[in-house]
Image (cartoon, rainbow, N blue to C red):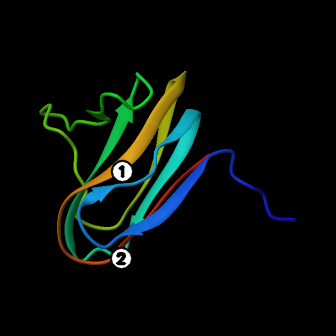
Amino acid sequence: MPISPKALVAGSFAGTGQSAAVAVAGRFNINLSGFGTATVKVERSFDAGSTWHVASRDAAGTEASYTANASLVADEPETGVLYRLNCMSFSSGPIAYRISQ
């Protein structure tokens, strides 16, 4: 019997734009695949989507972005926090994405 994810947003980017937002709490997965030439950032909102913040930074404090296939496991300690993917630049693709728990 297949297991259904508790939260799921999936689709693909064929240009710049944002995925739908999904509320997650605890451990969750993010998958990006099929990259041509593009930059995608993971964003989160603490105010029901009014304001978005890049969810991760590298060791130097620079906002993390993805330009190649990636599969991540993240952890959100708060309830009610929304996550989405933001395709900031796009030259070729499409780029498939999925956020699930």
What's the mark number on residue 32? none
Residue at 12%, 33% (x, y): give it. Answer: 60
Looking at the picture, tell me which residue is in the foreground, 2 or 89.
89
Local crowd at mark 2 within 10 Å, few (<14), some, or many (≥20)?
Answer: some
Residue 53 drawn at (x, y percent)? 27, 32
What's the mark number on residue 85? 1
Left or right, 30 with reference to 23: left
**Residue annotated with mark 2:** 34
Q: Is residue 99 above or below residue 79?
A: below
Q: Earlier in the sequence, mark 2 or mark 1?
A: 2
Local crowd at mark 1 within 10 Å, few (<14), some, or many (≥20)?
Answer: many
Query: Residue 42 falls in which quadrant of the image?
Result: top left
At label 2, the amino acid type is Gly
Residue 88 drawn at (x, y percent)? 19, 55
What secondary structure is found at the residue carrying circle 1? strand
Quarter containing the N terminus: bottom right
What secondary structure is found at the residue carrying circle 2? loop
Residue at 13%, 37% (x, y): give it. Answer: 62
Single out the mark in the foreground, 2 or 1: 1
Looking at the picture, tell me which residue is in the foreground, 21 or 27.
21
Residue 66 drawn at (x, y percent)? 25, 57
Q: Is residue 15 above or below residue 92?
A: above
Q: CA distance from mark 2 to mark 1?
A: 15 Å
Residue at 55%, 43% (x, y): give it. Answer: 28
Left or right, 69 with reference to 92: right
Residue 21 drawn at (x, y percent)? 46, 44
At label 1, the amino acid type is Leu
Query: Residue 96 falls in which quadrant of the image?
Result: bottom left
Farthest front residue in view: 50
Looking at the picture, tell me which residue is in the foreground, 28 or 50.
50
Q: How many marks?
A: 2
